[in-house]
């Protein structure tokens, strides 16, 4: 079974939480469940503007890393959207690559790309360097409007299931590309 990483990034004014779950229905099944759920908010309870995105996908494993997907996305800002698309996933001891393109089956015809790329070279027998780049980009095709782009970077150390270090989320929202950041330490635990 693939592991399920849970991560918290603590910025100066905001925090970010992410959990990735990818589980086959059984060891021999061609169907699997996938979600990359995110939540971020300010620490202040008076100025809080929380944001939560929870995609819930059913993947059909086609072979050679390719998958077809269908599901829904619940978004605290944009509401509920059915989605369909495809994905390529590659997992190795030192490298992970996930690239997913999906289309929102909504009036705006949202096209979304998710890319997660990790590199974990060994430093010692018990410690790995941990490097990750992640991008989420969403464009409303029917309205020809940028909706969201988030580019995330992580750099740190991995000792068994614990990963820790420094991270940054760069976030552009809407047609005016309103910019926000979360920069700070992160901790990640990889559940088996």
Image: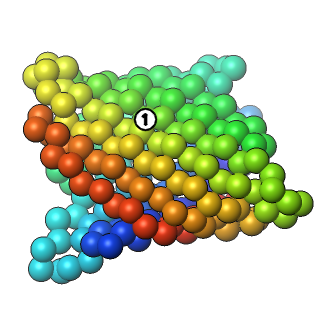
User: 45 or 57, which lies in front?
Assistant: 45
Residue 145 in sight from this viewpoint:
yes
- Residue ranking furthest to the right: 125
User: 46 or 123, which lies in front?
Assistant: 123
Q: Quadrant of residue 30?
A: top right
Horizontal side, residue 33 vs residue 27: left or right: left
| Display coloring | rainbow
Quadrant placement of the C terminus = bottom right
Residue at image location 34% in from the left, 44% down from the top: 150
- Residue 182 drawn above or below residue 21: below
Residue at image location 57% in from the left, 65% down from the top: 165
Which percent across, then down, holds residue 4?
60, 56
Which percent across, then down, holds residue 101?
41, 25
For label 1, the SS is: strand
Residue 58 in sight from this viewpoint:
no
- Residue ranking furthest to the bottom: 45
Which percent across, then down, holds residue 34?
51, 43
Horizontal side, residue 189 vs residue 159: left or right: left
Residue at image location 34% in from the left, 61% down from the top: 182
């Amino acid at each position: 079974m693939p592991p399920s990483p849970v991560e918290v990034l603590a910025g100066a004014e905001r925090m970010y939480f992410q959990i990735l779950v990818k589980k086959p229905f059984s060891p021999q099944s061609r169907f699997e469940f996938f979600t990359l759920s995110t939540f971020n908010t300010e620490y202040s309870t008076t100025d809080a503007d929380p944001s939560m995105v929870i995609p819930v996908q059913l993947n059909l494993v086609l072979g050679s890393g390719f998958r077809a997907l269908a599901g829904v996305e619940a978004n605290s800002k944009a509401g509920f959207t059915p989605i369909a698309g495809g994905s390529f996933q590659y997992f190795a001891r030192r490298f992970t690559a996930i690239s997913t393109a999906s289309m929102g089956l909504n009036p705006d015809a949202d096209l979304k790309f998710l890319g997660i790329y990790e590199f974990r070279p060994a430093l010692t027998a018990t410690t790995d360097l941990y490097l990750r780049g992640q991008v989420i980009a969403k464009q409303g095709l029917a309205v020809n409007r940028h909706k969201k782009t988030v580019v995330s970077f992580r750099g740190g150390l991995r000792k068994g299931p614990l990963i820790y270090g420094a991270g940054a989320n760069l976030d552009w929202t809407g047609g005016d590309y309103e910019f926000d950041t979360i920069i700070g330490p992160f901790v990640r635990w990889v559940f088996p």
